[in-house]
Amino acid sequence: MKRLTGKKTIIMDAGDVMVQREGVSFCRTCGGFCGVRLGIDEQGRLAQIKGDKEHPLTEGYACFKGLRAVETHNGPARLLHPLKRRPDGSFERIPLRQALDEIAEKLQIVIAAHGAQAVAIYRGTPNYVNAISYAFVDAWLKAIGSDSLFSTVTIDQPAKWVAAARLGYWRAGKRSISQSDVWLFAGHNPLVSHQGGGGFYANHPVNRMRQARERGMKVIVIDPRRSELTHYADIHLQIRPGEDAAVAAGLLHIVLGMGWEDREFCDRYVQGLDALRAAVLAFTPEYVAQRAGIKAEDLLAAAELFARQSRRGSLSTGTGANMGPYSNLAEHLYQTLGVVCGRFLRAGEQIDNPGILIPHKTFRAEVAPPQRTWEQGPHSRVKGWGRLFGEKLTGTLSDEILVPGQGQIRALIVPGGNPAVALPDQAKAVQALSSLDLLLSFDPVMSETARLAHYILPPTLQYERPDILPALSYPGYLPKPFSQYTDAVVAPPAGSEVVDEWRALWELARRLGKTLTLAGAELDMVTPPTAEQLLALLTKKAKVPLTEIRKYPSGKVFDIASAVVEPARPEASARFAVMPDDVASELTACLGYCDPPGYGYRLAVRRMRDVMNSTLRELDSIRKRNPSNPAWLHPDDMAALGLAAGDRLEIANEHGRVVAHAAPDERQKPGVVAVSHCWGGLPGDEAEAETAINQLISDSRVESISAMAWMTGIGVRLRRL
Ligand SMILES: Nc1nc2c(c(=O)[nH]1)N[C@H]1C(S)=C(S)[C@@H](COP(=O)(O)OP(=O)(O)OC[C@H]3O[C@@H](n4cnc5c(=O)[nH]c(N)nc54)[C@H](O)[C@@H]3O)O[C@H]1N2
Ligand SMILES: Nc1nc2c(c(=O)[nH]1)N[C@H]1C(S)=C(S)[C@@H](COP(=O)(O)OP(=O)(O)OC[C@H]3O[C@@H](n4cnc5c(=O)[nH]c(N)nc54)[C@H](O)[C@@H]3O)O[C@H]1N2
Ligand code: SF4
Ligand SMILES: [Mo]
């Protein structure tokens, strides 16, 4: 096959489709951001997709779900016209202009009656990988005068925000995976999730792991499942889910007891070390081993490998460690392990990626002091909850909608996201979403949330819109100063009336008489901007001009001035607060924590390789490989329960019960049942094999500060049906 350039028209055979021209882009289905090459047919439709071998970071790698784009763009499940719900629950097709007029009118009524705060946005996962829409969410709320922003961060890993705000963080960042000789993964499985951050780069994660192993990097994995990552592990602590706080306390007990901490670093940058030492005394290796279902000597070996045998290296945590009971504490203690071992970039060391899209920034060898944003207010009328970095807490969204009174949320906009299956306590969440005066869902398919919406606006899909990487301007996701711009490679389907989320938000703001401000500039509210203009605006402070980035369709690692960590300023005196009072009381409470009697198994979270939360479930190709959302159990447990593969079982806890179909997973720890999330339809649907696990997740058994529900490591009872 000939090499193709973006402009030339060449016909190549792609199975049963004829490809007329080729385009280059990057996949925005998950955070792997794989480079892709697209084939476009004679009608201008997406006809083929494959990994882009010329992409400097992903080198041709792309996964099964990313390669489903032809089906998502052209398949029968896609919504192509705005829909309005009729009183009987059915939907009618209406023109976009009418939909926008009516939505604006409803917003006006809500604002007049209840104030702008009554209008909220729930920022779901797809919004994070869409640079313009992401920026518009903040700008739009600001323009209408509402600060009712909820996001998936607070039903995902808010423990990371809480830990950074209680402990403090290192301004120069952690050592990354490419600069480390040991790495500890706690409840994080990037080989499936492609979730980066915290110094781990998830672009082509298999390659990253191979390269690190070739350099001799040691790996510790803490996971109830012998996950894909354990293939690269020197030590695997196969813990009971929900025991991360105890395990992390045990690791600290050993490290501080043996004197393996970095004394010099602790003397200068840590406060409360003695209190920490005393607080973890009770977490002896034997006690932790018994709680977590591991061997004490393995815990010792993990502590020794991390703290004594290796001097450079860090850790990353994922949903496994951030969704259980005491997850704020668990995250705090895992991060504290890195702190007492001084695992940060020091003055004179090189930053992997100073960031292309952000202006010049100084990285200093200093502690940023704890911020405790929730203490400063404002506080919610619902149980006095504070905010996390300005956001309201998604774990409280149902209450914020249902509890009457001043400040009650009456209108909700979902610019990508599926709260009807993602929120804890599904029945309550659905009741809340159904009670709104206005629910506007932007969704390409008839999702559970869309079904509850008054209006559904079908969005353009990823290859129909231009974009820039990294969407969040956050260099921490990319191992090198890399950036990539993509054009809209295909036009939306002929005859459709799909709309960019940002464009619809612009139209609504205009109808409400509001002016949007983006990147410091007031937008023209008469003539709509183009997406290209907006991307130029958003990247105006970039180190490399957008016009330059655009010259490299497969993206490029740019030769920008390298950044070296600067020494601390003399006046910088902040220290890591390793044992503040609230952390100390959580640690005491955690010591006494056990499952209620009669609930002998523990539920664990896990992600499905072929779907992105609830996205892609509707495709035939996905259903063929994943006909259900099963309950994964160790074969010994299945035998003990009398279950064969596919048999029905009941999973119950104090909050509720669900039915699931059993599936064997010999990699799972015995005593654990793992079920993925965001499946199961709405209550009343006949979707038994899909297991709506959030019927078991309570929104009252939650973490303090973040209102994060306990989604993993909770006691459940299993029964064959
Ligand atoms: N294919 C795919 N990719 C995804 C998603 C998806 O749905 N599918 N979802 C995306 C989203 S929204 C997110 S937030 C990220 C999440 O990214 P990750 O956090 O990396 O998610 P997982 O791959 O499920 O890895 C979590 C691991 O935690 C383990 N685990 C479960 N319970 C516990 C526990 O109590 N303690 C410990 N230590 N481990 C535990 C599980 O066995 C699993 O191996 O993934 C993103 N990427
Ligand atoms: N029990 C339990 N509950 C959980 C979790 C868990 O592990 N266990 N995980 C939690 C986590 S980490 C998260 S992030 C949340 C996920 O919560 P959400 O982010 O709310 O859910 P998603 O399923 O990712 O939302 C995807 C929706 O967006 C639509 N969509 C797909 N592509 C596009 C697009 O290009 N534009 C627009 N506008 N829409 C699009 C999809 O059709 C789908 O309806 O769930 C949380 N809930
Ligand atoms: S790993 Fe993520 S970014 Fe890469 S192809 Fe798959 S879905 Fe797309
Ligand atoms: Mo997430």
Image (cartoon, grey):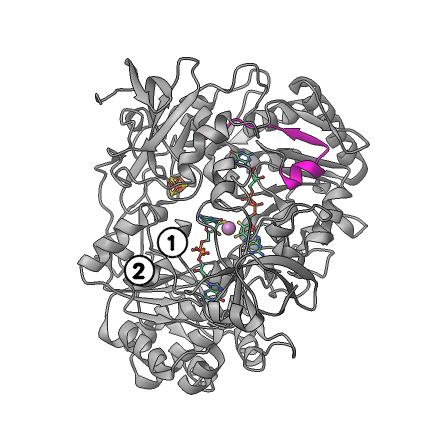
Q: Position of residue 559 (x, y in %)?
A: 21, 37
- The residue at label 1 has a CB less than 8 Å from ligand 1: yes
Q: Which residues are magenta?
A: 447-462
State the residue at coordinates (66%, 30%): 456
Q: Is residue 407 above or below residue 3?
A: below
The quarter holding residue 646 reads: bottom right
Q: Is residue 532 magenta?
A: no
| Amino acid under disc 1 | Pro
Q: Residues within 10 Å of mark 1 (few under 14, many from 20)?
A: many
| Amino acid under disc 2 | Ala
The quarter holding residue 527 reads: top right
- The residue at label 2 has a CB less than 8 Å from ligand 1: no
State the residue at coordinates (38%, 39%): 470
Q: Which mark is residue 190?
A: 1
Q: Which residue is mark 2?
A: 365
Q: Residues within 10 Å of mark 2 (few under 14, many from 20)?
A: many
Q: Is residue 245 above or below residue 142?
A: below
CB within 8 Å, label 2 to label 1: no
Callout 2: SS: loop
Question: Nearer the viewer's eye, disc 2 or disc 1?
Answer: 1
